[in-house]
Image (cartoon, rainbow, N blue to C red):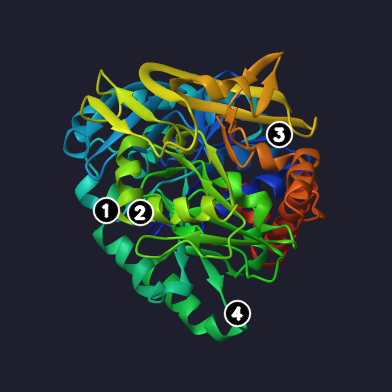
Amino acid sequence: MKALMIQGCGSNVGKSLLVAGLCRAARRRGLSVAPFKPQNMSNNAAVTVDGGEIGRAQALQALASGLEPHTDMNPVLLKPETDTGAQVVVQGKRLSTVRAKDYSALKPQLLDPVLESFHRLRAAHDLVIVEGAGSPAEVNLRQGDIANMGFARAAGVPVVLVGDIDRGGVIAQIVGTQAVLDPDDVGMVAGFVINKFRGDPALFDDGYRLISARTGWRGFGVVPYFSDALKLPAEDALDLGGTAGGGSLKVACLALSRIANFDDLDPLKLEPSVDLTMVRGGQVIPGDTALVILPGSKSTRGDLAYLRKQGWDVDIAGHVRRGGHVLGICGGYQMLGKAIADPDGIEGAPGATPGLGLLDVTTVMSADKRLTRTEALHVATGAPMHGYEIHIGRTDGPDRARPFAEVEGHPEGAVSADGRIMGSYLHGMFSGDKFRAAFLNRLGAPSTTHYGATVEATLDKLADHLEAHLDIDGLIELAR
C-alpha cells in the first residue's frame, strides 16, 4: 500500500491542516486513506475507539478520512507537564514521565511500536498520509529520530517539505533545510509545497522557480492562506484565540500555562451570541464577564499556582460576588474545590494545595488515568451530552450531591447550592448542539451553530482549496 510524508520547515507551518485536507481529497477520490503521525507533542488529546489517547490533530484527520480515531494513528504522544519534562504515551497508554534531556535515550525503544502501528495502517488502507513533527532541519535531534527523517528512512516513505511563506523567509526555509540535511536524508525528499500565501500566488513565481532550481526538488503548488481554518479544532496552543467580539454573552477562559484539551472552546467561538476572550498571563478577567471557564490542565496544582500568581483568584472571587457564573472542566473542576492532594507526586512534587474553595469537594490524584468516551444527561436542563474523560484523580464531597450531569444514572461533576459554580470532567461537552443550546439559553444567549456540520463542511472546503492550488494527483502518484 502507498504512503506519503508531509514534513515542515518548522512548527506551525500548517502540516496538520494540509494532511487533513489531503485525507479528505483522497477519500473523495474513492481511496481508503488514514492519517499517521509517528510522534506528536501536545496537551490537546482525543480519546480513541480502542480506549487510548492521541493528538487532537490526528482525530481531526481521522474525521477527514471518514474513520474513527485509533491509537495507531499517533503511536507516540508527548504531553508536557513542565518546561523540562513530559508524559510519554505509547500506542495510547502512559509509559512514563521523562525529562527532556533524557528523552533521547528513550527514543530508540519507540521506533518498533511506531513502525508496528504504521504497518498496520498501511496494510489496512490504500494510502497513509504521514505528518512529521517540528522540522527535519533540527539536525541536532537527528540521532534516534522517529518523527521526521528517521521514520521516513526506516519506513521507506517519500517526503514533501512544507514552507510557511506567511512568516517570511520561505526560500531560506526550504533551501536551508536541504543544506543542513544529511545527503541520505535529502534523498528522501521528493518535492516541496509553499503554504499560507496571501495575495496573488503568481507574484511568487520567480521564488518558486528559484527554490526548484536550487534544490532540484519538484514543486507541488502554492497554497493561499485558508482563513476558514479557524472553524476547525486547533491543536497548538499558539493558535489559541477568542472571537472577534460582538456577542451578547461575555465568556472569559483562562489561558493556563499547561492548558489542555482547549478545543473544548471551539464550538463556543463559532456562536454569534458569544464573545469569548482568552485571558492570558498579566491580563485581568474583564469585569463584564458573565461566565468564567477554568479549562483542563496537564499540571493542575502547578497551574493553580500560576492562576494565583496572575491574581485571577481575586478576579474570580469578585466575579462571583457580582453574580457571575464559573465552569471548571477537568483540571479546572479540580481547582474549584477545597483542596488538591497528590500524595504520590503523580503530577509533580508530593503534597497538597488549597483550592479556590468555590465547590465543597476535594481531589486526590492517583496513578490511574480514566480514558473513556461518555454519554451523559445535563441535570439542570435534561439535555443530552456527549464527550470524553481523560484525567487522573478522584473528586468527592458534599457538592457532588448536586451533580452537573448524570452518566448511566450515576452523578458526574458538582454544582454549588446557588447553581452558579459548576464543575465537570467531561471534555468536548459543547460540541453537542442540544446541550450547547440549552446551556447558553440558561445564560440568556441563543445558539445558532450546528458544530459538527460546520466542521464537516469546512473540511470539504479545505479539500476544495487544496484541489485548486496543489497537484494532488501528483502527490498521490508520488506515494509509494
Which one is in front, 279 or 192? 279
Mark nearer the N terminus (4 vs 1):
1
| Amino acid type assigned to the residue bearing label 4 in the image | Pro
Which one is in front, 37 or 414? 414
Task: Residue 371: give x, y in percent of width and height.
Answer: 53, 21
Q: Is residue 261 visible?
A: yes
424 displayed left or right of 386:
left
Which one is in front, 284 or 78? 284
Image quarter hosting the N terminus: top right
Tell me, yes or no, whether the two marked residues, 2 and 1, touch with CB atoms within 8 Å: yes
Residues under labels 3 and 2: Cα distance?
28 Å
| Mark number, residue 138 | 1
Helix, strand or loop at label 3? It is loop
| Amino acid type assigned to the residue bearing label 2 in the image | Ser
Residue drawn at (63%, 70%) of the image: 244
Mark nearer the N terminus (2 vs 4):
2
| Mark number, residue 135 | 2
| Mark number, residue 201 | 4
Eye-nearest disc, 1 or 3: 1
Helix, strand or loop at label 2? It is loop
The residue carrying pointer 4 sits among few (fewer than 14), some (14 to 19) or many (20 or more) residues within 10 Å by Cα, namely: some
The residue carrying pointer 1 sits among few (fewer than 14), some (14 to 19) or many (20 or more) residues within 10 Å by Cα, namely: some
| Amino acid type assigned to the residue bearing label 3 in the image | Ser
Helix, strand or loop at label 4? It is helix
Residues under labels 4 and 1: Cα distance?
29 Å
Tell me, yes or no, whether the two marked residues, 4 and 1, touch with CB atoms within 8 Å: no
| Amino acid type assigned to the residue bearing label 1 in the image | Glu
Q: Is residue 3 visible?
A: no
Indicate the quadrant where residue 344 lies: top left
